[in-house]
Amino acid sequence: MADTPNMEAQVQELQQQLEQLKIKAGSSVFDAYQTSLTARYCSPEMSRLFSQRSRHSTWRKLWLYLAEAESELGIDAVTPDALDQMRAHLVLADADFEVARVEEKKRRHDVMAHVHAFGAVAPKAAGIIHYGATSCYVTDNAELILMRDAMDLLLPKLAKVIDNLAKFAVEWKALPTLAYTHLQPAQLITVGKRAAQWAQDLMFDLESIEHVRRELKFRGAQGTTGTQASFLEIFNGDAAKCDQLNELVCKKAGFASCYDVSTQTYTRKVDLIIANAITGLGPTTQKICGDIRHLATWKELEEPFEKDQIGSSAMAYKRNPMRSERMYSLARELMSKPASFANTLSDQWMERTLDDSAIRRIDIPSTFLLADAILMGLDNITNGLVVYPKVIEARVQQELPFMITESIIMKLVAKGESRQEAHEQIRVLSHQAGSVVKNEGKPNDLVDRIRATPFFKPILPDLDDMLRPDLYIGRSVDIVDRFCGPGGVLEQKISPYRAVVDKAVTAELSV
């Protein structure tokens, strides 16, 4: 007991040391909420693109583009020294964010806070930063740049997934498998044919994103309500210089042209158009992953399952399709985004209301982060799909007797029997065999029943040959070859990304 005061003193001293260390090091990343998208699912490059440093450094680049263009068009207030200082501080340092934080708390305006922070490190430019511009010159143009660059990240990843599925489809183009309509066994297809359908849906997504990427334009320097009034005043009424200003700014930012009409912002219809293209990946992903989950349940096909992977904390034997389930759930969230973008567009009163600001800070990054995470997951899944031919063959043989009945009817008619009588005979025997399967749990004995029924004697010599599954896959092999094979549709479609795809490694998931 005599040591208790000393022990308490030591504990207090240790706590004080820990508090000092915490103050010195800053709060741990584990002490504040982080989005699961950046912490668990999306790529580092997409996370960096939508980071605060990337966004606000883009603002600084836009201020530089404007100042350079104004200088080139004869604005003497923009000096070479000012431009040099701006160029030297385009990427924000950590200290710049602190300056901006203090300024924003005082001024309640994020753009002006960053104008002051930029001017603090480029004092010779402080008086001309943002000259003639409105806030949306940097905020809107930055969003367009970020979305353009984000699409440039997504497109090769999407092409990689399509390439994975094309190769898989060709490899398994001739393996007969049950097709399902109404989720009930239907006419046979092949494993590769089903994968070709998945790839085609992704190809449509690729085309949609390519289209909006190709049609994307810049807001440019349009002034407060899209009339360029401030720039017309700067250039002493010279409208030609206003046009030249936008041409220069567009060129510097890597855009071909500006939207023909703007208000204070570019129309939020653009965001909705882009969102519709990106979020199209959502239903495609749910379709693909839903199919994989069903096939895994039937033990026909599985996503990759690693040596030390755990499928269930309780049921050690389980091999749950957890990656497909995660992508399915992320796709559900992605599919919800267009409604928010549509609401933002519809709520823009007259030339602009600020209720588009906070929501777009959430919606735009999360849409691209979700799409990125989904494509990483799909790449990982589709590059390692495991097929179980023996299980597939057994399931085909279980249903094949029912599937040959149409061919039996046609052969009987060709030998002079009534089509209606043949149909009735088959119907009765099929229902009897189905009852045996369902009520007695026994194998399908339809073929044995056909052999034992005199009515079918004319086709019995052909019966064994009719039980070959490859007779019932139609043109599956040809369809896969034409669409997925060498020189096929997909090869041509992803050819612009071939160099990137061939060098890419399979996405490695963190979870």
Image (cartoon, rainbow, N blue to C red):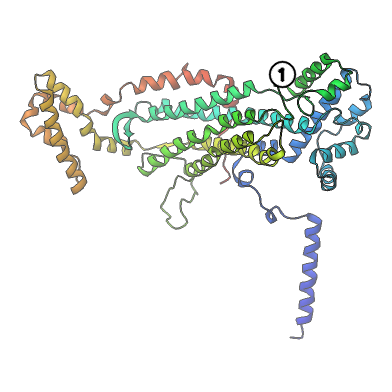
Element carrying mark 1: loop
- Image location (x, y in percent) of residue 5: 78, 81
- Image location (x, y in percent) of residue 476: 35, 23
Would you place residue 266 above or below residue 329 in this image? Answer: above
Q: Give the quadrant of residue 207.
A: top right
Answer left or right for 131 relative to 182.
right
Q: Give the quadrant of residue 136.
A: top right
Q: Please tell me which residue is depicted at 75% across the width and 33% down the height of the picture.
A: 139
- Image location (x, y in percent) of residue 481: 41, 20
The residue wearing badge 1 is 257
Would you place residue 508 above or below residue 75 in this image? Answer: below
Answer left or right for 264 relative to 483.
right
Type of the residue with mark 1? Ser
Q: Please indicate, yes or no, whether residue 172 appears anywhere in the rendered image.
A: no
Answer left or right for 443 relative to 131.
left
Would you place residue 216 above or below residue 7 in this image? Answer: above
Q: Please indicate, yes or no, whether residue 450 appears anywhere in the rendered image.
A: yes
Q: Please tell me which residue is depicted at 56% across the width and 46% down the height of the picture.
A: 511
Q: Quadrant of the N terminus?
A: bottom right
- Classed neighbour count for the residue bearing mark 1: other residues with Cα under 10 Å, few (<14), some (14–19), many (≥20): some
Number of marks: 1
**Front residue (pair 58, 324):** 58
Q: Please tell me which residue is depicted at 85% across the width and 23% down the height of the picture.
A: 68
Q: Give the quadrant of residue 275.
A: top right
Most distant residue in the front direction? 350
